[in-house]
Image: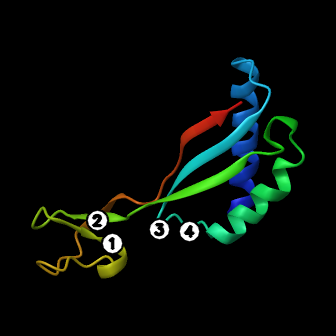
Amino acid sequence: MHEMGIILHLAKSLEEEAKAQQIEKILRVTLQVGEVSGIMTDYFTDCWNYFRKRHPVLETAELELETIPAVTFCGNCEKTYPTVQYGRECPYCHSGETWLLKGNECIIKEIEVE
């Protein structure tokens, strides 16, 4: 249920930026969401639709989500691989000495304004 907290933080950040840039209305927000971020995109969108109505600058703003594929690096063989498909064990050398390179983030990519 961290989606609600992320939306609250996002709305606050967007309102602050709109005020700083003297923007009256945001039309669209594009977010990049990591494949293994744990964000449930359907619930995230529902939270957005609820909270945007309480922020005049965001009231009509649409939310567009893009997925960032998760990629893991193997410290043993120094190769990368798709995290979701193979998990924590490297598919090349079967080492567990791996770490996530990307796919856990949530980034504001673009804000379209009036």
Q: Contact (CB < 8 A) between labels 1 and 3?
A: yes
At label 2, which amino acid type do we have?
Thr
Q: Contact (CB < 8 A) between labels 2 and 3?
A: no
- Mark 3–mark 4 Cα distance, whole angstroms, equals 5 Å
Q: Earlier in the sequence, mark 4 or mark 2?
A: 4
Horizontal and vertical percent for residue 34? 47, 60
Q: Contact (CB < 8 A) between labels 3 and 4?
A: yes
At label 4, which amino acid type do we have?
Gly
Q: Secondary structure at mark 2?
A: strand
Horizontal and vertical percent for residue 103? 41, 60
Say whether residue 1 is visible: no
- Mark 2–mark 1 Cα distance, whole angstroms, equals 5 Å
Instruction: Please name the residue that numbered disc 3 is placed on.
Output: 36
Q: Which mark is residue 38?
A: 4
Q: Residue at x 69, y 19 (%)?
A: 21
- Mark 4–mark 1 Cα distance, whole angstroms, equals 14 Å
Horizontal and vertical percent for residue 24? 80, 26
